[in-house]
């Protein structure tokens, strides 16, 4: 239980820090605006956090605080099937999300919101992008799934004998930790959380990790293209407004 308490406190502190920054920017007229890109300081803090999580997870695993079974991982000989399930599940999630946006006619707005949110997690300098890619695309899918779903949902559920409290707490933490991407992205993160928990209890954590890898890699591989599309749509909208403004009454 000590491991669960540690990771709960760790994530609550992260949420409190983010909320404090948001409050300062909203209420302090002298506060600097939120950066549009990941700053070197933020990259350094994120990298240190990822390395710390790996160290804590490795140490506690060696100490027997958690096992592959307790976090919902199938035996290694079944990991290939977990990868396939995760790929199919992520494809289904993307199609479902795109379908909802299409029906609601919100695809252009959500494309712009997703691009802005992803830019906030992507630095400008090439050397910083390489480091960010390592921490986001290699470290993060494994550390986040092991901590947020493996330990704070599956492992905690085994300790409590019920999954209700861990699933609800995990949902709230998931929403709060991704709030930096804006409220418009909360639907995507909520849908992903539901998918990850479903995979966790109906297949294994490896399938959720696979889906998370795709969820972290694809947005940044396509970020430049999406940014061009958003800027082109913005220019077209400005041109349309300009034409309407000069039309005679």
Image (spheres, helix red, strand yellow):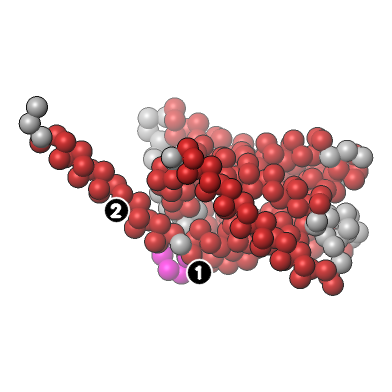
The answer to which of 207 and 143 lies nearer the viewer is 207
Main secondary-structure element of the magenta-colored stretch: helix
Residue 170 appears left or right of 157: left
Measuring from the top left, give residue 49's x and y in whole percent. Answer: 64, 55
Measuring from the top left, give residue 96's x and y in whole percent. Answer: 59, 48
Sequence order check, earlier mark of 1 and 2: 1
Q: Which residue is under mark 2?
A: 232
Q: Which residues are magenta?
A: 124-129
Residue 128: say if magenta.
Answer: yes
The answer to which of 246 and 113 lies nearer the viewer is 246
The answer to which of 240 and 138 lies nearer the viewer is 240
**Residue 195 makes an appearance in the image:** yes
Measuring from the top left, give residue 191's x and y in whole percent. Answer: 63, 44
> What residue lies at 84% left-to-right and 72% top-to-bottom?
77
Occupied quadrant, residue 178: top right
Q: Is residue 191 above or below residue 50?
A: above
Q: Which residue is under mark 1?
A: 130
């Amino acid at each position: 239980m000590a491991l669960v308490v540690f990771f709960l406190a760790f994530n609550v502190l992260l949420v409190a820090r983010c909320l404090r920054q948001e409050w300062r920017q909203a209420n302090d007229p002298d506060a600097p605006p939120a950066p549009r890109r990941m700053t070197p300081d933020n990259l350094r803090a994120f990298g240190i956090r990822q390395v710390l999580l790996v160290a804590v997870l490795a140490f506690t695993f060696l100490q027997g605080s958690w096992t592959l079974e307790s976090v919902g991982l199938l035996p290694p000989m079944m990991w290939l099937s977990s990868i396939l399930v995760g790929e199919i599940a992520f494809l289904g999630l993307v199609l479902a999300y795109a379908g909802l946006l299409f029906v609601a006619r919100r695809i252009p707005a959500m494309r712009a919101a997703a691009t802005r949110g992803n830019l906030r997690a992507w630095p400008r300098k090439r050397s910083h992008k390489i480091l960010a890619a390592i921490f986001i695309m290699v470290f993060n899918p494994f550390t986040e799934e092991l901590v947020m779903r493996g330990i704070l949902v599956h492992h905690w559920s085994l300790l409590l004998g019920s999954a209700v409290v861990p699933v609800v707490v995990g949902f709230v933490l998931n929403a709060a930790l991704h709030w930096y991407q804006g409220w418009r992205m909360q639907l995507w993160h909520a849908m992903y959380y539901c998918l990850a928990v479903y995979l966790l209890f109906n297949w294994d954590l490896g399938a959720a990790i696979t889906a998370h890898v795709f969820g972290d890699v694809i947005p940044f591989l396509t970020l430049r293209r999406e940014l061009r599309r958003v800027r082109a749509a913005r220019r077209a909208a400005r041109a349309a407004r300009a034409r309407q403004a000069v039309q005679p009454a």
